[in-house]
Amino acid sequence: NLVKTVDIFQNYCIIYSSEQNLKEVRLLNIQYKKGVIELCILSVLSKRDMYGYELSEYISKQIDISDGTVYPILRKLKADGLVKTYLSEDSGGPPRKYYALTQTGMDNFKRDAEEWLSFTRTVNNMIKGD
């Protein structure tokens, strides 16, 4: 068995596995991170509407993500009816596509945020030994 280190949100865990299992763990971590980023997008949009680049820049200052991460998630959220878009010419330049939560998006965010907070409390308690 090989010992490998995998970066998970700036924390490290040791994975004892074969190379194939390591690839599967990395894929799982990428999917997990996308789910968390989806929750982060909903959170930011629950406070105010943003255009895509602005949203991507804001999240990338908080979490290490690649440039193209946010846009596919925004397309998925729109297809799922959680966000809507509109054009606005705030800066005097070309219109920007803004993203806003729908009522369904707000409801999902509130539910998912509570589940996330409960989950992380449980995990933190387990790690601390409480």
Image (cartoon, rainbow, N blue to C red):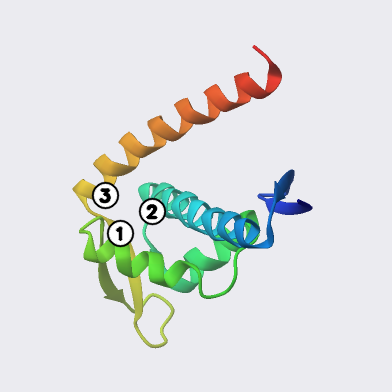
What residue is rendered at 54% in x and 30% in y? 120
| CB atoms of marks 3 and 2 within 8 Å | yes
Residue at (32, 70) in percent of width and height: 75
Find residue 41 and report its image quarter: bottom left
Disc 2 from disc 1: Cα separation: 6 Å
| Crowding at mark 1 (Cα within 10 Å: few <14, some 14-19, many 20+) | many
Of the pair 9 and 56, the residue shown nearer to us: 9
What amino acid type is highlighted by mark number 1?
Ala
Crowding near pointer 2: few (<14 within 10 Å), some, many (20+)? many
Above or below: residue 12 compared with residue 86: above
Which residue does the image show at 42% across and 54% down from the upper left? 38
Q: Name the residue nearer the viewer: 110 or 100.
A: 110
Check disc 2 and report the residue beneath it.
45
Question: Which tag is nearer the camera, tag 1 or tag 3?
Answer: 3
User: Gap in Å between the C-alphas at discs 1 and 3?
Assistant: 9 Å
Secondary structure category for the residue under label 1: strand
The answer to which of marks 1 and 3 sits earlier in the sequence is 1
Total residue callouts: 3
User: Label 3 belongs to which residue?
Assistant: 105
- Which residue reaches farthest front? 1
Quarter of the image holding residue 130? top right
Q: Position of residue 8 (x, y in %)?
A: 66, 50
> Are the residues tagged 2 and 1 within 8 Å (C-beta)?
yes
Residue 71 position, x and y percent, is 42, 72
Query: Looking at the image, which residue sits at the far right?
Result: 3
Residue at label 1?
100
What type is the residue that disc 3 sits on? Answer: Gly
Find residue 72 and name its label. Answer: none
Disc 3 secondary structure class: helix
Amino acid, disc 2: Leu
Locate residue 23 relative to residue 116 in the image: left or right.
Answer: right
Closest to the observer, 77 or 122: 122
